[in-house]
Amino acid sequence: MLKEIRCYVMRTIENNKMKLMGYQGFLPPVQKSRLEKEKEAAQKWTATWSGQESRFEVTCWGQRVVVDLAAGTCTCRWWQLNGMPCFHACAAIRWKHERPGNYVHAWLTMGAYRSTYEFAIQPTRSQQYWEPLLMRSLFHQT
């Protein structure tokens, strides 16, 4: 079973490396898609600057949340838990005329994705080859 798991992980790493080898974006496609959905949902929300540097009150249909762009926090806690700005934060970022991608945590970027897959699992020999190699190495040591 471990052999099958190792082979599955080797194939997965290889496939993910190959898929994004030529990709040049700042965010991986999956994260970019998630951020686009958050930006779309942010269209319904209105951000009001509190007068402090980066704090906003974001409202929609009587609901209010507090967003602090400098701290990377929102009352809904989505941003803190996922590392990606929630739609409340996207509304505040839109008010500042900035890009939401600049507020994504570093672990969700292409740099982190590439560093995840920079290593490879090494192939191993079948068990039938273990003993002869062991015997050969024993004879060479004496």
Image: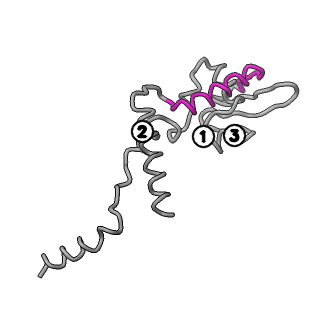
Label 2 – label 1 distance at C-alpha: 23 Å
Indicate which disc, 3 or 2, sits on the residue closer to the N terminus.
2
- Badge 3 marks a residue whose secondary structure is helix
Label 3 – label 2 distance at C-alpha: 29 Å
Q: How is the image coloured?
A: one colour
Query: Where's residue 56, x and y in %?
Result: 71, 28
Task: Say if 35 sits above or below 3 in the image.
Answer: above
Q: Report the amino acid beneath label 3.
A: Trp
Q: For the point 51% across and 63% down, which residue is it?
A: 1
Q: Which mark is residue 17?
A: 2
Indicate which disc, 2 or 1, sits on the residue closer to the N terminus.
2
Q: Which residue is mark 1?
A: 83
Residue 57 appears left or right of 33:
right
Q: Report the amino acid beneath label 2.
A: Lys
Q: Residues within 10 Å of mark 3 (few under 14, many from 20)?
A: some
- Badge 2 marks a residue whose secondary structure is helix
Indicate which disc, 3 or 1, sits on the residue closer to the N terminus.
3
In this picture, which residue range is highlighted in magenta? 27-50
Q: Report the amino acid beneath label 1.
A: Gly
Magenta-drawn stretch contains 51: no
Q: Quadrant of residue 52?
A: top right
Residue 1 appears left or right of 47:
left
Q: Which residue is mark 3?
A: 78
- Badge 1 marks a residue whose secondary structure is loop
Residue 73 appears left or right of 45:
left
